[in-house]
Each structure stands twice: as structure tokens, then as C-alpha cells.
Amino acid sequence: MSRYLKTAGLALAAMALPSIAAAQDAVMNSGDTAWILTATALVLFMSLPGLALFYGGLVRSKNYLSVLMKVYAIAALASIVWVVAGYSIAFGGANGWWGGLDNLFLKDLGRDAVSGTIPESVFLAFQMTFAVITPALIVGAFVERVKFLPVLIFTALWLLVVYAPVTHWIWGGGWLSTYGGGVVDFAGGLVVHATAGISALVYVFMLGKRKGFPHELAVPHRPAIVMIGASMLWVGWFGFNGGSQLAADGGAGMALLVTHISASVATLVWVAIEAMTNKKPTLVGAATGTIAGLATVTPAAGVIGPGGALLIGLAGGLLCYFAVHLIRVKLKIDDSLDVFAVHGVGGILGILILPVLSAEFLGGTGDGVFMTQLVGTLVVVAWSAGASFLILLALKFTLGLRVTEEQEFEGLDVSLHGENAYN
């Protein structure tokens, strides 16, 4: 009885005092908190060790450790940049274009601060793992020929100038979150995959091709490691997309389900195409198809149903496969590990077809307006390309971007880090 009296008293107080009602809404939910804590760990697991192993297995053995080192160092650096200023820029309230610097070093973060139904510290940490993996994705574009220090400087500047502002525009209450009804980007088709994919392409043009590309380069040295890394990414993506619901509810469950469906379809599409064209489907190809399906479904995971997931996985597998062939084989662009073709193309594709595949008869929510999605895409692509070019231009004429021919021939493991992966 006392429980019901207490509930009735709170209801009366809420009606009498709206401010009290608002306060009651901002109460932490232990179930939501537990899920986002888990999702945070899963997304970090995607970078360490998932992405590092996926990329590391794709390069030649003499550059294996250099790839692991870059991803590892970026994870640490991005975390600190996020704490110092990235979170403030992304989720501050200065204006629609820029979150501001009022929360530098998280000086306003209190132990009891709540964001929605979870502690703000948990929300901040979850978003931090996105800030970790996004610049780490770019590593795949420039492996086997890039200096170490400029990569770190680029990462820090890129997070502050590209990633954090775009995050604010779409997820932090910025102008793209309201333009034309709001850009729908559930878990990062633009914020993560488009920014990384476009910036990777710019990096490739500024850096130049590897020596011997495309005819003298060896095949991936550890396909088994590629598959293990891709598997870790696949599992971690449940936190990436399911956690983006920021609640332990039906929306998170549906996001997890459609993520898995899309990845499965795209994997089989890649295997089927290789079987038809080369007669021998490869493990590396299957793993690449998985990542294509995951990247493509990311922006739409919160608004599509199982029917839409089947179609988006099919589209992602097909388009990303032919994008890889076009960029690497036809155009001979040395985006070494297909960052743009898989992540850039996949993320943008997911953004643009989302309004169609979110139809209610496919089990979706009906959200998304194509013209709004298109404008958001053009803006993010232009900003990412322009800002990345200026950062890289400054680095190229100061520190330089590329190792010497002797270092490239010897391999970056020994020439830059003094270590061998295999003794």
C-alpha cells in the first residue's frame, strides 16, 4: 500500500510542478546502463584487436606489426583527444555548427550526471569508442608506406576538425539533425564510414601508390588472421548498432537482428560473385563482404526491419564488390585495404537507400527523406575531403607523409619500430 501512495504522491507533485516531472524523466535506468556498458566494451573490441587483426592480416608480413601499432596508438590518442576537447565539440550546446569548448577536459562532468537514462560518463565512453574506431579505419588506406608520427598528428587534428563537428551536426543537436526533418544516421553511415572513407581516399592521393602497385604486391600474408579480425568486428558490431539505441529495448533488439541479417547476406553475395568470376571463393573475400554488409546497414539499423535488412545486405555486397574492382583494378588507385570502396561506399549507400528500405511493409519505421539524406551526404563528403586535404597538405610540407624507398623495401616493422612479427 505504501508503494502505491508514494507513486500517487509523485504523480500529483509532477502535475503541480513541471520541473519535478522533468527531473523524474532524467533518472538512470540500470538495464539501459548495463547494456550500454556492454556495448561500449564491444565497440572498443572492434578496434582492439578486431580491426587491427583484420588489417594486419591483409598486408605483407614485413608490415604486420606496423599496422597493429598504428591502430593501437590511435586508440590511445583518440581517447585522450575525446576527453580533452572532442566530446565538448561534438555534444556541447554552443550552436548548430560547433558544440564549443565549454566542457574542455570534461570539467562539467559530474559523477551523478545523467544523459537520457544512462550516466553521462557511460554515454561519453560509448561515443569515445566511435571516435577511436573512425580514424583507425583510415589506416587501411595508407599501410606499408606511411610515416608514424604524421599519422598521429593527422588523427588528432582530424578528430577535432572533421569527426567531432560532423558528430555535432548529426548526433549532437546540430543543424543536420533538424534540416529537412533531420538526417537519419542511426549508428554512423555518415559520421563514421563516410568521413573515414572520403578522408582515406584523400590520404591516398596525397601519399601516392606503393612501390610495385598493382602488379608486384603479394597477397594477404595471413588470411586466417583476417577472418578472425572480421569475426571480432562482426560480434562487436552488435554493440556498435544495438548500443546506438541507447536503451535496452525492442529497438536495440531489432538493430542487432538487422545488423546480423545484412552481414550474412553480404557475405554470401561476395562468396557467390567470387565463385562465378574466379571459380574459387576466398576467405578474405568472404570477410570483406561481411564488413561491407555491416557498413551498409549501420546508418539504417534503427529504422529498417528484416525485409529491409535482406535488401540492404544484397545492395551493400554487390555495390561494394564492384567498387573495390573499379577503384583497385580499373582506376588503379592504391587504397590499400579498400577503405573507401567498403566503408565509404557502403556507408553512403546505406544513407541514401534508407528512406526506401525503411518502408513499413518491409518492417521498418518509415523514417528518412531522400533529399535530406542527400544534402547531408554532400555536406559531410565535402567537409571531410576539404578539411583532410588541408591537414595533409600542411603535414606533407612540414614532416612529410611517406617513408623512404629504403624503409618501404625493408618493411615498416623493422625500419620504423625495430621489431619483427616472425622470428
Image: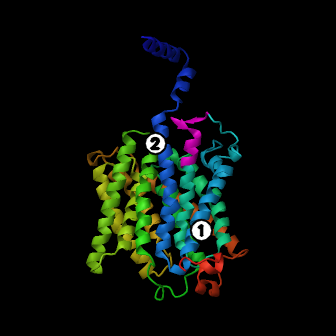
Tell me where residue 81 appears, x and y as whole percent.
66, 55
Would residue 119 be counted in the magenta stretch?
Answer: yes
Instruction: Please give the name of the residue rendered at 30% of the width and 67% of the height, measured from the top-left corner.
Output: 269
Task: Tell me: 255 left or right of 11.
Answer: left
Task: Tell me: 248 left or right of 272.
Answer: right
> Label 2 is placed on what type of residue?
Trp
Tell me where residue 252 appears, x and y as whole percent.
40, 44
Q: Which mark is residue 117?
A: none
Does residue 137 appear in this view?
Answer: yes
> Label 1 is placed on what type of residue?
Lys
Q: CA distance from mark 1 to mark 2?
A: 29 Å
Does residue 390 appear in this view?
Answer: no
Q: Which residues are magenta?
A: 112-126
Q: Earlier in the sequence, mark 1 or mark 2?
A: 2
Q: Which residue is mark 2?
A: 35
Tell me where residue 244 appears, x and y as whole percent.
46, 47
Q: Which residue in the rendered view is the most extreme toward the front?
A: 423
Crowding at dot 1, Cα within 10 Å, few <14 / some 14-19 / many 20+, comes out as: some
Tell me the quarter of the image containing the C terminus.
bottom right
Crowding at dot 2, Cα within 10 Å, few <14 / some 14-19 / many 20+, comes out as: some
Would residue 312 be counted in the magenta stretch?
Answer: no
Instruction: Please give the name of the residue rendered at 59% of the width and 59% of the height, measured from the top-left corner.
Output: 75
Instruction: Please give the name of the residue rendered at 53% of the width and 59% of the height, measured from the top-left corner.
Output: 133
Taking depth in this image into account, of 166 and 422 the one nearest to the observer is 422
Q: Which residue is mark 1?
A: 70
Task: Tell me: 107 left or right of 214.
Answer: right
Q: Is residue 45 above or below residue 100?
A: below
Tell me where residue 136 appears, x and y as whole percent.
55, 63
- Which element type, helix, strand or loop, lies under badge 1? helix
Tell me the quarter of the image containing the N terminus.
top left
Tell me which corner region of the image, top left, top right, bottom left or bottom right, holds residue 261: bottom left
